[in-house]
Amino acid sequence: MTPDRLIRAVWRHMTPAMGETSRGELLRATLGTALAIALTDILLWTLRHFTPALPGGTGDPMRELILVSPFAATAFLILTVPNSPLAQPWSVIIGNTIGCACGALCVWLLPYPVLAAATGVGLSVIAMSAVRALHPPGAAMALNAVLLHFSGTETGVAFVLATVTVGSVLLVLFGMVFNPLTGRRYPFRQANETLPKEAISLAAILERLKLSANIGVTDLSRLIAAVEAEATAHHLGHMAAGSMMTAAPFTLPPTATLPEIGAAFKEHPFRSIPVTEHGLYLGLLRQSALLDAAEDASAQSLMQKVDTVAPTAELPEVLPHLTTGRLRVLPVVEDGKLVGIITRSDLIGVLARALRGE
């Protein structure tokens, strides 16, 4: 390989692998990370102020910083990449706790700083892997515990639990509030979420490709579904929502009573009915909402706000709404007025006709 080709090859691998971050996402992550660190420090300081026996302070309560430096990386993961397996609550809390405990154990067993640091970091990786709690700041916690110990700070059990574990819990709780409020899901996969058979297959693929620590099964499933939807839309060409919808659908007024709603579902083979007033779209009433409805409930109190599309919306915009399992009926709204609905049956019929060339 010639020198110029070698330089080009090296340069190609050194350039950024990530796309540009939008300004809105950058502002969200920046604000969230800063607030998480500030609030966690305030709460930890408050805890130590009322529990003076806890180690880790400077003696001057107005100048104390209770946080440990790896918390910055933890906050970054939770607020910037909240869908990463490395940022989920189990990984954060257990990973940080185990990492710090490994460092604290090594300084007790090994009196030499370099040896204790290297052994603590290596041991933390083994321990986090064993309990499926890989969290990069956890390895930094091991190193941090060694550095704090040899600088004169007590890093025993009280420090591990009262500072690292509690601080990790606080960061996770902040992420569980801030991320959903700003449009991101966190935790990304609930611990008791049962994976379907196809998701289990995806998990096996991720494991075989050594990518299970980088991308979650749910995230990969969403990515594949989006790619399939784009491929289908590209294959079928431009198709607008107005050409797929059922025009002038049956609707209910917001004042409809529970008996009237029940009669409507009994008369019409619908599972969801739009609620309108003078033609204006208000929401979607699902049949399941009647199960626990009070006797004085009305259509307006039982309806839900769901996603809508304009009549000009094309297939790539319509498909994700009806293929993710969240919606069976997609309202088509123009200037606030309901002009039609697209059901899954409508979508299947349109796709079938297009594939037959009709």
Image: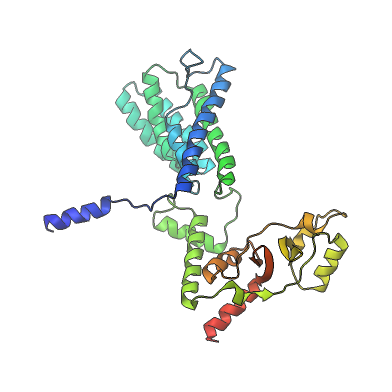
Which residue corresponds to the image point at 31% horizontal and 22% vertical from the top-left? 112
Residue 270 pos. (x, y %): 75, 70
User: Does residue 73 lie above or below 243 as drawn?
Assistant: above
Of 268 and 2, the residue lying toward us: 268
Left or right? Give the position of 209 relative to 221: left
**Where is the C terminus found, in terms of image quarters?**
bottom right
Which residue corresponds to the image point at 56% horizontal and 65% vertical from the top-left? 320
Left or right? Give the position of 14 relative to 304: left
Residue 8 pos. (x, y %): 19, 55
Residue 241 pos. (x, y %): 59, 72
How many numbered marks appear?
0
Residue 6 visible, this angle: yes
Of 138 and 119, the residue lying toward us: 138
Of 256 and 45, the residue lying toward us: 256
Query: Where, by quadrant of the figure, is residue 49 drawn?
Result: top right
User: Does residue 275 lie above or below 68 as drawn?
Assistant: below
User: Does residue 232 lie above or below 17 as drawn?
Assistant: below
Of 56 and 244, the residue lying toward us: 244
Q: How is the image coloured?
A: rainbow
Residue 131 visible, this angle: no
Left or right? Give the position of 268 relative to 331: right
Which residue corresponds to the image point at 71% horizontal and 57% vertical from the top-left? 304
Query: Where, by quadrant of the figure, is residue 110 drawn?
Result: top left
Residue 180 pos. (x, y %): 58, 46
Which residue corresponds to the image point at 86% horizontal and 60% vertical from the top-left? 257
Query: Where, by quadrant of the figure, is residue 154 drawn?
Result: top left
Pick out the residue farthest to the left: 2
Pick out the residue farthest to the top: 59
